[in-house]
Amino acid sequence: MEPIYSIELHNGQAWSAVIQKGKIFKLTSLNDNPNVALLCYNANQPLDRYNMPDTLKGQHISKLCKGSCLHSDMGRLLLSIVDSSCAWHDPIGGLSTEAEIVKKFGHKTFAEVRNDYYRNGYDNFLTELGKHGLGKRDIVPNVNLFSKVYVNEDGSMHFEPQTSGKGDYVSLRTEMKVLVVLSNTPHPLFPKGNYPGGNIKIEVFESDVVDAKKDICYQSRPENFRAWETTQAYLNLSE
Amino acid sequence: MSVLNYCESQRRIDDAIESSLIPAGDGYIHRINAGQVIRLVDLEGNQAVDTLFYNADDFSERYSAQATIMAQSSVYLTTGTKLMSSEGNVLLTIIADTCGRHDTLGGACSRESNTMRYAHDKLFMHACRDTFLLQLQKWGVTNAKRDITCNINFFMNVPLTPEGGLRFEDGVSAAGRYVELKAEMDVVILISNCPQLNNPCNAYNPTAAKIYIWNP
Protein backbone atom coordinates (compact mmCIF):
# COMPACT_ATOMS: atom_id res chain seq x y z
CA MET A 1 0.00 0.00 0.00
CA GLU A 2 1.23 3.49 -0.84
CA PRO A 3 1.58 5.90 2.08
CA ILE A 4 -0.50 9.09 1.98
CA TYR A 5 2.40 10.90 3.66
CA SER A 6 6.04 10.15 4.35
CA ILE A 7 9.02 11.97 5.80
CA GLU A 8 12.40 11.07 7.23
CA LEU A 9 13.30 12.24 10.70
CA HIS A 10 17.05 12.58 11.13
CA ASN A 11 18.95 11.87 14.31
CA GLY A 12 18.09 14.40 17.02
CA GLN A 13 15.15 15.94 15.17
CA ALA A 14 11.62 16.62 16.34
CA TRP A 15 8.34 16.48 14.43
CA SER A 16 4.67 17.04 15.17
CA ALA A 17 1.46 16.66 13.19
CA VAL A 18 -2.28 16.51 13.51
CA ILE A 19 -3.47 13.18 12.10
CA GLN A 20 -7.08 12.27 11.34
CA LYS A 21 -8.84 9.29 12.89
CA GLY A 22 -8.42 5.95 11.12
CA LYS A 23 -4.86 6.30 9.87
CA ILE A 24 -1.91 3.99 10.41
CA PHE A 25 1.14 5.87 11.50
CA LYS A 26 4.27 3.75 10.98
CA LEU A 27 7.80 4.44 12.21
CA THR A 28 10.71 2.41 10.82
CA SER A 29 14.26 2.65 12.12
CA LEU A 30 16.93 3.04 9.44
CA ASN A 31 19.81 2.63 11.94
CA ASP A 32 20.80 0.82 15.12
CA ASN A 33 19.88 1.98 18.64
CA PRO A 34 16.73 3.91 17.76
CA ASN A 35 14.69 5.77 20.37
CA VAL A 36 11.72 7.99 19.57
CA ALA A 37 10.02 9.85 22.41
CA LEU A 38 6.28 10.28 21.79
CA LEU A 39 3.52 12.41 23.25
CA CYS A 40 -0.07 12.38 22.02
CA TYR A 41 -3.09 14.66 22.51
CA ASN A 42 -6.70 14.82 21.37
CA ALA A 43 -6.26 17.36 18.55
CA ASN A 44 -9.69 18.91 19.12
CA GLN A 45 -9.20 19.28 22.86
CA PRO A 46 -5.54 18.96 23.91
CA LEU A 47 -6.51 18.97 27.60
CA ASP A 48 -7.42 15.36 26.79
CA ARG A 49 -3.96 13.78 26.57
CA TYR A 50 -1.94 10.57 26.76
CA ASN A 51 -1.82 9.29 30.33
CA MET A 52 0.90 6.83 31.29
CA PRO A 53 -0.64 5.56 34.56
CA ASP A 54 -4.07 4.95 33.00
CA THR A 55 -2.42 3.17 30.06
CA LEU A 56 -0.41 0.89 32.35
CA LYS A 57 -3.11 0.29 34.99
CA GLY A 58 -5.76 -0.36 32.36
CA GLN A 59 -3.72 -3.12 30.77
CA HIS A 60 -1.71 -4.33 33.82
CA ILE A 61 1.53 -3.67 31.95
CA SER A 62 4.78 -1.73 32.31
CA LYS A 63 5.68 -2.15 28.62
CA LEU A 64 3.89 -1.42 25.35
CA CYS A 65 3.81 -3.88 22.45
CA LYS A 66 1.59 -5.11 19.60
CA GLY A 67 -1.99 -5.16 20.93
CA SER A 68 -1.46 -2.36 23.48
CA CYS A 69 -3.49 0.84 23.45
CA LEU A 70 -2.42 4.35 24.47
CA HIS A 71 -5.15 5.75 26.73
CA SER A 72 -6.04 9.38 27.35
CA ASP A 73 -6.75 10.78 30.80
CA MET A 74 -10.44 11.04 29.86
CA GLY A 75 -10.99 7.29 29.60
CA ARG A 76 -10.57 7.29 25.79
CA LEU A 77 -8.19 5.75 23.27
CA LEU A 78 -5.74 7.89 21.32
CA LEU A 79 -3.53 5.32 19.57
CA SER A 80 -3.37 1.53 19.25
CA ILE A 81 -0.24 -0.46 18.46
CA VAL A 82 -1.59 -2.63 15.64
CA ASP A 83 1.81 -4.05 14.69
CA SER A 84 5.43 -3.93 15.76
CA SER A 85 8.61 -5.94 15.28
CA CYS A 86 9.66 -4.91 18.81
CA ALA A 87 8.31 -6.77 21.83
CA TRP A 88 8.88 -3.83 24.17
CA HIS A 89 8.36 -0.06 23.96
CA ASP A 90 9.20 1.83 27.16
CA PRO A 91 6.51 3.93 28.91
CA ILE A 92 8.41 4.84 32.12
CA GLY A 93 11.97 6.00 31.30
CA GLY A 94 11.06 9.58 30.44
CA LEU A 95 12.81 12.24 28.47
CA SER A 96 16.42 13.31 27.89
CA THR A 97 17.44 16.79 29.01
CA GLU A 98 20.22 19.11 27.88
CA ALA A 99 22.24 18.52 31.07
CA GLU A 100 22.13 14.72 30.64
CA ILE A 101 23.02 14.84 26.97
CA VAL A 102 26.05 17.05 27.65
CA LYS A 103 27.14 14.82 30.55
CA LYS A 104 26.98 11.62 28.52
CA PHE A 105 27.75 12.58 24.95
CA GLY A 106 29.47 15.94 25.19
CA HIS A 107 28.50 19.30 23.83
CA LYS A 108 28.07 19.93 20.13
CA THR A 109 26.51 23.26 19.30
CA PHE A 110 24.98 24.57 16.11
CA ALA A 111 27.77 27.12 15.87
CA GLU A 112 30.30 24.28 15.69
CA VAL A 113 28.63 21.54 13.66
CA ARG A 114 25.57 23.20 12.12
CA ASN A 115 22.54 20.89 12.00
CA ASP A 116 24.32 17.92 13.54
CA TYR A 117 24.23 19.62 16.94
CA TYR A 118 23.15 17.46 19.91
CA ARG A 119 19.49 17.99 20.61
CA ASN A 120 17.57 16.73 23.64
CA GLY A 121 14.05 15.44 24.19
CA TYR A 122 12.84 18.14 26.57
CA ASP A 123 13.84 21.08 24.37
CA ASN A 124 12.48 19.31 21.29
CA PHE A 125 9.09 18.73 22.93
CA LEU A 126 8.90 22.27 24.25
CA THR A 127 9.63 23.66 20.79
CA GLU A 128 7.11 21.46 18.97
CA LEU A 129 4.39 21.93 21.62
CA GLY A 130 4.79 25.69 21.28
CA LYS A 131 3.62 25.42 17.66
CA HIS A 132 0.29 24.06 18.90
CA GLY A 133 -0.31 26.53 21.74
CA LEU A 134 1.03 24.09 24.34
CA GLY A 135 3.99 24.33 26.69
CA LYS A 136 5.72 23.18 29.87
CA ARG A 137 2.47 22.38 31.63
CA ASP A 138 1.57 19.94 28.86
CA ILE A 139 4.67 17.76 29.05
CA VAL A 140 3.50 14.54 30.67
CA PRO A 141 5.32 11.19 31.00
CA ASN A 142 6.10 10.12 27.43
CA VAL A 143 6.55 6.84 25.57
CA ASN A 144 9.99 5.81 24.30
CA LEU A 145 9.37 3.80 21.15
CA PHE A 146 11.96 1.10 20.34
CA SER A 147 13.48 1.10 23.87
CA LYS A 148 13.29 -1.35 26.76
CA VAL A 149 13.55 -0.55 30.48
CA TYR A 150 12.65 -3.30 32.94
CA VAL A 151 12.26 -3.07 36.71
CA ASN A 152 13.50 -5.65 39.19
CA GLU A 153 11.73 -6.69 42.38
CA ASP A 154 13.73 -4.15 44.40
CA GLY A 155 12.52 -1.34 42.12
CA SER A 156 15.81 -0.84 40.28
CA MET A 157 15.47 0.26 36.63
CA HIS A 158 17.52 -1.38 33.87
CA PHE A 159 17.96 -0.23 30.29
CA GLU A 160 18.47 -3.16 27.95
CA PRO A 161 20.59 -2.07 24.98
CA GLN A 162 20.20 -3.27 21.40
CA THR A 163 16.67 -4.60 21.74
CA SER A 164 15.89 -2.94 18.42
CA GLY A 165 17.83 -1.85 15.39
CA LYS A 166 17.80 -1.21 11.67
CA GLY A 167 14.53 -2.31 10.05
CA ASP A 168 12.52 -2.47 13.26
CA TYR A 169 9.12 -0.80 13.06
CA VAL A 170 5.98 0.11 14.97
CA SER A 171 2.55 0.85 13.48
CA LEU A 172 0.07 2.93 15.46
CA ARG A 173 -3.58 3.43 14.53
CA THR A 174 -5.19 6.77 15.31
CA GLU A 175 -8.37 6.28 17.34
CA MET A 176 -9.45 9.91 17.00
CA LYS A 177 -7.98 13.05 15.43
CA VAL A 178 -4.72 13.34 17.35
CA LEU A 179 -1.76 15.64 17.74
CA VAL A 180 1.39 13.49 17.73
CA VAL A 181 4.71 14.94 18.89
CA LEU A 182 7.95 13.01 18.29
CA SER A 183 11.54 13.52 19.33
CA ASN A 184 14.22 11.32 17.75
CA THR A 185 16.61 11.68 20.69
CA PRO A 186 18.53 9.25 22.92
CA HIS A 187 16.81 7.35 25.71
CA PRO A 188 17.75 8.93 29.08
CA LEU A 189 19.22 5.61 30.23
CA PHE A 190 21.32 5.04 27.09
CA PRO A 191 24.90 4.53 28.31
CA LYS A 192 27.66 7.09 27.99
CA GLY A 193 29.59 7.12 24.70
CA ASN A 194 28.62 8.25 21.23
CA TYR A 195 25.33 10.10 20.72
CA PRO A 196 23.22 7.13 19.54
CA GLY A 197 20.42 6.67 17.07
CA GLY A 198 19.91 7.48 13.45
CA ASN A 199 17.19 8.19 10.97
CA ILE A 200 13.54 7.23 11.31
CA LYS A 201 11.15 6.84 8.38
CA ILE A 202 7.64 8.10 9.13
CA GLU A 203 4.80 6.90 6.90
CA VAL A 204 1.06 7.42 7.21
CA PHE A 205 -1.39 4.97 5.60
CA GLU A 206 -5.17 4.61 5.46
CA SER A 207 -6.35 2.04 8.00
CA ASP A 208 -8.42 -0.94 6.90
CA VAL A 209 -12.00 -1.04 8.13
CA VAL A 210 -11.86 -2.29 11.70
CA ASP A 211 -14.13 -4.96 13.18
CA ALA A 212 -14.07 -3.95 16.84
CA LYS A 213 -15.27 -7.39 17.94
CA LYS A 214 -12.16 -8.99 16.43
CA ASP A 215 -9.56 -6.26 16.72
CA ILE A 216 -6.32 -7.34 18.42
CA CYS A 217 -6.02 -4.06 20.37
CA TYR A 218 -9.63 -3.56 21.49
CA GLN A 219 -9.90 -7.22 22.45
CA SER A 220 -6.58 -7.61 24.26
CA ARG A 221 -8.15 -6.28 27.47
CA PRO A 222 -11.78 -5.55 28.45
CA GLU A 223 -10.49 -2.13 29.62
CA ASN A 224 -9.39 -1.35 26.06
CA PHE A 225 -12.81 -2.29 24.69
CA ARG A 226 -14.60 -0.08 27.22
CA ALA A 227 -12.25 2.81 26.39
CA TRP A 228 -13.04 2.22 22.70
CA GLU A 229 -16.80 2.37 23.50
CA THR A 230 -16.24 5.63 25.42
CA THR A 231 -14.30 7.00 22.45
CA GLN A 232 -17.12 6.13 20.05
CA ALA A 233 -19.66 7.85 22.31
CA TYR A 234 -17.41 10.93 22.47
CA LEU A 235 -16.97 11.01 18.66
CA ASN A 236 -20.70 10.52 18.07
CA LEU A 237 -21.48 13.53 20.25
CA SER A 238 -18.69 15.83 19.19
CA GLU A 239 -18.27 15.25 15.45
CA MET B 1 8.47 -8.68 48.94
CA SER B 2 11.73 -6.91 48.51
CA VAL B 3 13.63 -4.73 50.96
CA LEU B 4 11.58 -2.06 52.71
CA ASN B 5 13.47 0.90 54.02
CA TYR B 6 12.22 1.66 57.56
CA CYS B 7 13.35 4.95 59.11
CA GLU B 8 11.77 6.66 62.12
CA SER B 9 11.70 10.38 62.89
CA GLN B 10 12.65 11.98 66.20
CA ARG B 11 10.28 14.95 65.68
CA ARG B 12 7.71 15.51 68.44
CA ILE B 13 4.06 16.05 67.57
CA ASP B 14 3.89 18.74 70.27
CA ASP B 15 6.42 20.85 68.36
CA ALA B 16 4.39 20.92 65.13
CA ILE B 17 3.08 24.37 64.22
CA GLU B 18 0.04 23.00 62.46
CA SER B 19 -1.89 19.79 61.90
CA SER B 20 -4.89 18.91 59.75
CA LEU B 21 -7.09 15.87 59.52
CA ILE B 22 -7.85 14.93 55.91
CA PRO B 23 -10.99 12.78 55.89
CA ALA B 24 -11.38 9.99 53.34
CA GLY B 25 -12.16 11.46 49.91
CA ASP B 26 -11.22 15.02 50.86
CA GLY B 27 -8.65 17.35 49.33
CA TYR B 28 -5.96 19.52 50.90
CA ILE B 29 -3.80 22.27 49.43
CA HIS B 30 -1.21 24.26 51.37
CA ARG B 31 1.98 26.24 50.92
CA ILE B 32 5.10 24.72 52.52
CA ASN B 33 8.14 26.97 52.78
CA ALA B 34 11.75 25.91 52.26
CA GLY B 35 13.09 24.22 55.38
CA GLN B 36 9.68 23.26 56.77
CA VAL B 37 9.01 19.59 57.39
CA ILE B 38 5.72 17.80 56.73
CA ARG B 39 4.59 14.42 57.99
CA LEU B 40 1.76 12.45 56.39
CA VAL B 41 0.22 9.79 58.60
CA ASP B 42 -1.79 6.80 57.40
CA LEU B 43 -4.10 6.79 60.43
CA GLU B 44 -5.89 3.49 59.92
CA GLY B 45 -3.65 1.71 57.42
CA ASN B 46 -3.60 0.93 53.69
CA GLN B 47 -4.85 4.34 52.62
CA ALA B 48 -3.54 5.83 49.36
CA VAL B 49 -2.70 9.51 49.80
CA ASP B 50 -2.43 10.91 46.26
CA THR B 51 -0.06 13.88 46.25
CA LEU B 52 1.34 16.48 43.85
CA PHE B 53 3.86 19.27 44.46
CA TYR B 54 4.50 22.57 42.68
CA ASN B 55 7.01 25.38 42.88
CA ALA B 56 4.95 27.78 45.03
CA ASP B 57 5.78 30.76 42.81
CA ASP B 58 5.48 29.08 39.40
CA PHE B 59 3.19 26.09 39.00
CA SER B 60 4.67 25.34 35.57
CA GLU B 61 7.54 23.84 37.55
CA ARG B 62 6.10 20.78 39.24
CA TYR B 63 6.81 17.34 40.63
CA SER B 64 8.07 15.01 37.91
CA ALA B 65 7.63 11.30 38.56
CA GLN B 66 9.95 10.43 35.70
CA ALA B 67 12.75 12.80 36.74
CA THR B 68 12.43 11.46 40.29
CA ILE B 69 12.70 7.76 39.43
CA MET B 70 15.45 8.43 36.88
CA ALA B 71 17.50 10.42 39.42
CA GLN B 72 17.64 7.39 41.73
CA SER B 73 17.32 4.64 39.06
CA SER B 74 14.53 3.10 41.10
CA VAL B 75 10.76 3.30 40.76
CA TYR B 76 9.85 3.21 44.48
CA LEU B 77 10.06 6.20 46.83
CA THR B 78 11.41 5.99 50.38
CA THR B 79 13.82 7.67 52.83
CA GLY B 80 16.52 9.50 50.89
CA THR B 81 14.45 9.94 47.73
CA LYS B 82 14.76 13.42 46.29
CA LEU B 83 11.49 14.54 44.73
CA MET B 84 12.62 16.17 41.49
CA SER B 85 10.88 18.93 39.58
CA SER B 86 10.26 19.15 35.86
CA GLU B 87 13.14 21.68 35.79
CA GLY B 88 15.63 19.33 37.46
CA ASN B 89 15.46 20.96 40.92
CA VAL B 90 14.90 19.15 44.22
CA LEU B 91 11.45 20.07 45.58
CA LEU B 92 11.54 17.99 48.75
CA THR B 93 13.51 15.13 50.29
CA ILE B 94 11.99 12.16 52.11
CA ILE B 95 13.72 12.18 55.50
CA ALA B 96 11.77 9.49 57.38
CA ASP B 97 9.46 6.67 56.36
CA THR B 98 7.92 3.91 58.47
CA CYS B 99 6.05 2.40 55.52
CA GLY B 100 9.09 1.63 53.36
CA ARG B 101 7.80 1.98 49.83
CA HIS B 102 5.61 4.44 47.98
CA ASP B 103 4.33 4.35 44.41
CA THR B 104 4.68 7.08 41.78
CA LEU B 105 3.72 5.25 38.56
CA GLY B 106 0.16 4.17 39.41
CA GLY B 107 -1.31 7.65 39.00
CA ALA B 108 -4.53 8.95 40.50
CA CYS B 109 -7.99 7.56 39.94
CA SER B 110 -10.46 9.59 37.91
CA ARG B 111 -14.13 9.16 37.15
CA GLU B 112 -13.28 8.69 33.50
CA SER B 113 -10.55 6.13 34.11
CA ASN B 114 -12.90 4.24 36.44
CA THR B 115 -15.20 3.65 33.45
CA MET B 116 -12.26 2.22 31.52
CA ARG B 117 -10.90 0.12 34.38
CA TYR B 118 -14.10 -1.21 35.96
CA ALA B 119 -17.43 -0.43 34.27
CA HIS B 120 -19.25 2.43 32.53
CA ASP B 121 -21.60 2.83 35.50
CA LYS B 122 -18.68 3.96 37.72
CA LEU B 123 -18.68 7.37 36.00
CA PHE B 124 -20.19 9.26 38.92
CA MET B 125 -18.16 7.75 41.74
CA HIS B 126 -15.96 10.26 43.57
CA ALA B 127 -12.33 10.19 42.35
CA CYS B 128 -8.95 11.78 43.03
CA ARG B 129 -8.56 13.82 39.86
CA ASP B 130 -11.89 15.59 40.53
CA THR B 131 -10.53 16.50 43.96
CA PHE B 132 -7.24 17.73 42.45
CA LEU B 133 -9.17 19.86 39.94
CA LEU B 134 -11.46 21.41 42.52
CA GLN B 135 -8.58 22.26 44.87
CA LEU B 136 -6.53 23.85 42.06
CA GLN B 137 -9.54 25.82 40.80
CA LYS B 138 -10.16 27.18 44.30
CA TRP B 139 -6.45 28.05 44.61
CA GLY B 140 -6.99 30.25 41.54
CA VAL B 141 -5.07 28.28 38.94
CA THR B 142 -6.35 28.81 35.41
CA ASN B 143 -6.71 25.86 33.05
CA ALA B 144 -6.00 23.66 36.06
CA LYS B 145 -6.28 20.29 34.35
CA ARG B 146 -2.90 20.92 32.71
CA ASP B 147 -1.35 20.81 36.18
CA ILE B 148 -2.63 17.37 37.10
CA THR B 149 0.36 15.24 36.25
CA CYS B 150 1.72 11.92 37.39
CA ASN B 151 1.46 11.98 41.20
CA ILE B 152 2.86 10.17 44.22
CA ASN B 153 0.68 7.57 45.92
CA PHE B 154 1.95 7.61 49.46
CA PHE B 155 1.39 4.29 51.29
CA MET B 156 0.46 2.47 48.07
CA ASN B 157 2.12 -0.61 46.62
CA VAL B 158 2.18 -1.08 42.83
CA PRO B 159 4.90 -3.62 41.99
CA LEU B 160 6.32 -3.81 38.48
CA THR B 161 7.75 -7.10 37.22
CA PRO B 162 10.92 -7.66 35.14
CA GLU B 163 8.65 -9.24 32.48
CA GLY B 164 6.76 -5.98 31.94
CA GLY B 165 3.75 -6.57 34.19
CA LEU B 166 2.15 -4.30 36.78
CA ARG B 167 0.13 -5.46 39.78
CA PHE B 168 -2.02 -3.81 42.40
CA GLU B 169 -1.27 -5.37 45.72
CA ASP B 170 -2.43 -4.95 49.27
CA GLY B 171 -0.57 -2.09 50.85
CA VAL B 172 2.64 -2.48 52.81
CA SER B 173 1.35 0.21 55.14
CA ALA B 174 -0.49 -0.13 58.45
CA ALA B 175 -2.23 2.08 61.03
CA GLY B 176 0.06 4.88 62.20
CA ARG B 177 2.72 4.52 59.50
CA TYR B 178 4.06 7.82 58.25
CA VAL B 179 6.34 9.53 55.77
CA GLU B 180 8.20 12.75 56.51
CA LEU B 181 9.49 15.23 53.93
CA LYS B 182 11.63 18.34 54.13
CA ALA B 183 10.92 21.13 51.65
CA GLU B 184 14.07 22.18 49.77
CA MET B 185 12.27 25.12 48.16
CA ASP B 186 8.95 26.92 48.62
CA VAL B 187 6.31 24.48 47.39
CA VAL B 188 2.57 23.93 47.31
CA ILE B 189 1.34 20.49 48.31
CA LEU B 190 -1.88 19.18 46.76
CA ILE B 191 -3.48 16.06 48.25
CA SER B 192 -6.44 13.90 47.37
CA ASN B 193 -7.09 11.39 50.10
CA CYS B 194 -8.17 8.66 47.71
CA PRO B 195 -11.89 7.68 47.64
CA GLN B 196 -11.37 4.63 45.38
CA LEU B 197 -13.73 1.76 46.29
CA ASN B 198 -13.05 -0.48 43.30
CA ASN B 199 -9.61 -1.89 44.10
CA PRO B 200 -7.44 -2.83 47.07
CA CYS B 201 -5.43 0.44 47.13
CA ASN B 202 -7.47 1.55 50.18
CA ALA B 203 -8.35 -1.98 51.32
CA TYR B 204 -11.88 -1.19 49.96
CA ASN B 205 -12.36 1.15 52.91
CA PRO B 206 -11.01 4.70 52.47
CA THR B 207 -9.96 6.23 55.78
CA ALA B 208 -8.59 9.53 57.09
CA ALA B 209 -5.00 10.76 56.88
CA LYS B 210 -3.29 13.46 58.92
CA ILE B 211 -0.69 16.05 58.05
CA TYR B 212 1.68 17.83 60.48
CA ILE B 213 3.93 20.78 59.67
CA TRP B 214 7.09 21.79 61.56
CA ASN B 215 9.13 24.95 61.19
CA PRO B 216 12.86 24.59 60.46
Image (tube, rainbow, N blue to C red):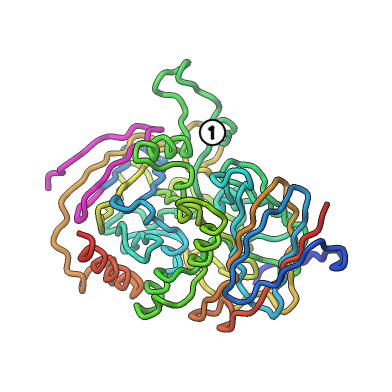
The residue lying at 35 percent from left, 43 percent from top is: A181
Residue B126: give x, y in percent of width and height: 48, 75
Residue B118 in the image, given as x and y percentages of width and height: 40, 78
Q: Is residue B119 above or below residue B69?
A: below
Question: In this rendering, would A210 be left or right of A27?
Answer: left
Residue count near mark 1 (Cα–Cα under 10 Å), binned few <14, some 14–19, many ≥20: some
Identify the element where label 1 is drawn.
helix
* Quadrant in which the C terminus of chain A appears: bottom left
Query: In the rendered image of this protein, does residue A73 appear above or below residue A145?
Result: below
In the foreground, A100 or B55? B55
Whether A10 is among the magenta residues is yes
Please state if B174 lies on the left or on the right of A85 as rendered.
Answer: right
Name the residue rendered at 21%, 50% in the picture.
A20
Could you tell me if residue B10 is visible in this image? no
Bounds of the magenta segment = A1-25
For the point 50% across and 53% down, the residue is B147
Badge 1 is on which residue? A98
Residue nearest the observer in this picture, B19 or A60 = B19
Query: Which x, y percent locates residue A199?
Result: 33, 35
Residue A39 visible to an observer of this rendering: yes
Residue found 54% across the figure and 31% down from its top: A105
Amino acid type, label 1 = Glu
Q: Position of residue B116 (x, y in %)?
A: 37, 72
In which chain is the residue bearing label 1?
A
Q: Quadrant of residue A216?
A: bottom left
Image quarter of residue B17: bottom right
Looking at the image, the residue that sits furthest to the top is A112
In the rendered structure, the answer to whether residue A145 lies left or right of residue B19 reads left
